[in-house]
Image (cartoon, rainbow, N blue to C red):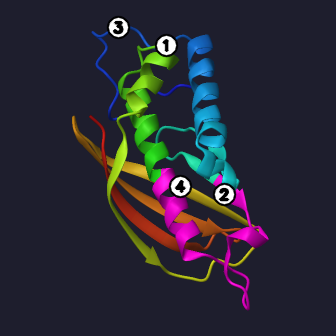
């Protein structure tokens, strides 16, 4: 489902949005990039749960390799940080895709090569314990050169275990 109320959407006098077929191809390509092509995301086991423009979501299962505190079975802080950074980057990617919603999947994906983290802050609120985790993010600003995001990582009970804020270069 495509929503036209996205705050970064282009005005109606611009070219029309991607067709449903083009949008499906765009979303398929985004999933492939974030789940398969980015090897570190694949190593973490990240799965795209939603590409909804106002709150994209990633999920992953706890595995032995992700434990930081072996005596307590807690998720490693570096994993938490990496997941928050990744969901922030995905949120920026989705926002750019919506901003340039008249471009083909290949054209928009070409823009993603320019995205890079320039600042990341993580607040660890609770131990990362559980079988599954979910991350979500919102873009708070999408400028011509810099984008800002707010991110959250939740455990399987829906409790926030960490929050983050990040800035990304987008040009």
Depth order, front residue of 169/2: 169
- Whole-percent x, y for residue 153 in the image: 56, 65
Q: Give the alpha-carbon distance from disc 2 to disc 3, as whole Å.
A: 38 Å
Tag on residue 81?
Answer: none
Whole-angstrom CA distance, mark 4 to mark 3, is 30 Å
Neighbor class of circle 2 (other Cα within 10 Å; few <14, some 14-19, many 20+) is some
9 to 52, vertically: above or below = above
For the residues labelled 1 and 4, say whether their Cβ atoms are less than 8 Å apart: no
Pointer 2 residue: 44
57 over 69 or under it: above or below: above
- The answer to which image quadrant residue 5 occupies is top left
Write down the residue under mark 1: 18
Residue drawn at (63%, 20%), measured in percent from left and top?
24
| Relative vertical location of residue 56 with respect to residue 152 in this rendering, above or below | above
Q: Which residue is mark 4?
A: 136
Element at badge 1? loop
């Amino acid at each position: 489902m495509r929503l036209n109320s996205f705050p970064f959407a282009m005005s109606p006098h611009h070219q029309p949005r991607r067709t449903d077929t083009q949008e499906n191809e765009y979303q398929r390509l985004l999933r492939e990039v974030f789940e398969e092509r980015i090897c570190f995301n694949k190593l973490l086991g990240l799965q795209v749960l939603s590409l909804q423009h106002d709150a994209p979501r990633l999920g992953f299962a706890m595995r032995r390799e992700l434990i930081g505190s072996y005596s307590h079975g807690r998720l490693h802080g570096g994993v938490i940080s990496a997941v928050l950074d990744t969901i922030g980057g995905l949120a920026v990617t989705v926002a750019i895709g919506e901003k340039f919603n008249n471009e083909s999947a290949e054209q928009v994906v070409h823009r993603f090569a320019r995205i890079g983290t320039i600042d990341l802050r993580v607040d660890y609120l609770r131990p990362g314990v559980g079988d599954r985790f979910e991350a979500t993010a919102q873009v708070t600003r999408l400028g011509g050169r810099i984008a800002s995001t707010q991110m959250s990582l939740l455990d399987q009970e829906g409790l926030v275990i960490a929050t983050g804020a990040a800035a990304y270069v987008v040009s």
